[in-house]
Amino acid sequence: MNLFKSFLVFIFACLTISTVFAVTVAQVPLHTFPVDDGTKSYYVTGKDGVNIFVEEKGDPKKTTIIFSSGFLTSRTSWDQQWYDPKFKEKFHLIRYDYRGIGNSDKPHTKPHPFVINSDLFNTKHICYSDNSDTSPYTFDSQADDLFALINKLSSKYDFKKKKIVLVGWSMGTPITLNFMKNYPNIKIDGFVSVSGLVNNTNVFHGVIETLFQDMIDPQEKFSRVITGLDGFIRLFPFKPFSNELHSFFLGNAVMAPIEYRLYPAIPFSFTEFYSTLTIPTLHIIGKNDSLVNIEHSLYFASLGKNAKSIFYKDVGHCALWENTKEFNKDIIKFISKI
Ligand SMILES: *[C@@H]1O[C@H](CO)[C@@H](O)[C@H](O)[C@H]1NC(C)=O
Ligand SMILES: *[C@@H]1O[C@H](CO)[C@@H](O)[C@H](O)[C@H]1NC(C)=O
């Protein structure tokens, strides 16, 4: 009886703990990354009550790096940086899952508002949501989520003494630019664009049009959507990903709802805003990027007032995994000087 009672108490304690704290459970890792490396995880409440999953580690007195991932990828796309001891030694690190991705909430709009018309690929037959006001996945709501995260940090740490550097990969770049534009009172000290884009007209290679149409199939036919996602992820690297790494990215991508998959079709341009930005900026560009064309990368970098560029040979859209050694070295060097 006593044993049974203690068992119940134990179960109850477990349940209570798991509802109060974000749970850390044993996992089977893709790599032999350390299980307990001091990462703290929690949720912040983003725009319209959407829960955004955040991870944090390192000494908060040091410069904070906030990593924003690419389209259809989660915070774990930064594993190669997150688990590099040199990053943890030198910086305070934050990464998070966008709304619609990973452990964050995935809001829906019903019914899905599809409209046939787009100049994204200079064609007139792509389906996308024209209803950008009601989409939960606008650039503005993503900027608000990032603000919620930074707001939480500012309540914990002395922001007057704090340096913050934003690192965005691919679509993470316009997301961070829009955050800086919408929240000019938050002091950001540096910016890194990894294979970033500053607008979405004539940016993508043609092959993406077909893949994108599959990905956003209005019938949501599973096999068609998967074909699109699979083909899209195969375009990330110059040399192919291992099967494990491909599955890792594909697994993250399939979790995103249709409304999320549609958002890059909403036209955007941060050209004007970026041209006014004077904080130190680094552009990392893969010379063999099959997603964002090189002309666009050069155009983007040329707009920077205080920008330098580093080009990687035999690297595609995913320098963070394709050339981790140089990438980590270059980013650490750049941010250390800020
Ligand atoms: C990779 O990029 C280099 C430099 O732009 C180019 O000369 C080369 O042809 C590209 N390789 C492939 C296979 O596209
Ligand atoms: C978008 O980028 C292209 C370069 O890829 C540039 O030619 C064009 O002027 C830009 N458009 C806007 C609206 O920012």
Image (cartoon, grey):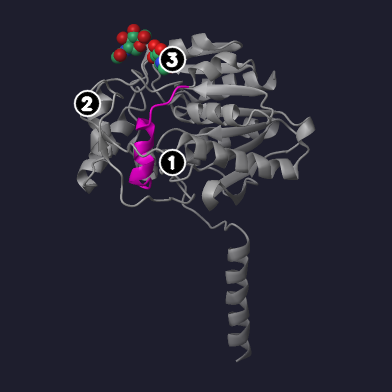
Does any atom of ligand 2 lie closer than 8 Å to the CB of label 1?
no
Choose mark 1 or mark 2, whichever is in front: 2
Quadrant where ligand 2 appears:
top left
In this orientation, does residue 286 appear?
Answer: no
Q: Which residue is mark 1?
A: 137
Does any atom of ligand 2 lie closer than 8 Å to the CB of label 2?
no
Name the quadrant containing residue 147. top right
Disc assigned to residue 124: 2
In the rendered view, does 276 fall on the left or right side of 172? right
> SS of the residue at dot 2?
loop
Where is residue 214? Give x, y as percent.
23, 37
Disc assigned to residue 297: 3
Q: Are marks 3 and 1 in contact (CB under 8 Å)?
A: no
Q: Which residues are magenta?
A: 254-269
Name the quadrant containing residue 188. top right
Tell me the kind of residue under disc 1: Tyr
Where is residue 178? Give x, y as percent.
53, 29
Crowd class of label 3 (few under 14; some 14 to 19; many from 20; radius 10 Å): many
Q: Are marks 1 and 2 in contact (CB under 8 Å)?
A: no
In this orientation, does residue 99 appear?
Answer: yes
Choose mark 3 or mark 1, whichever is in front: 1
In the rendered view, does 49 fall on the left or right side of 254? right
Crowd class of label 1 (few under 14; some 14 to 19; many from 20; radius 10 Å): many
Q: Does 266 appear above or below 277?
A: below
Name the quadrant containing residue 134. top left
Pick the front one: 336 or 219: 219
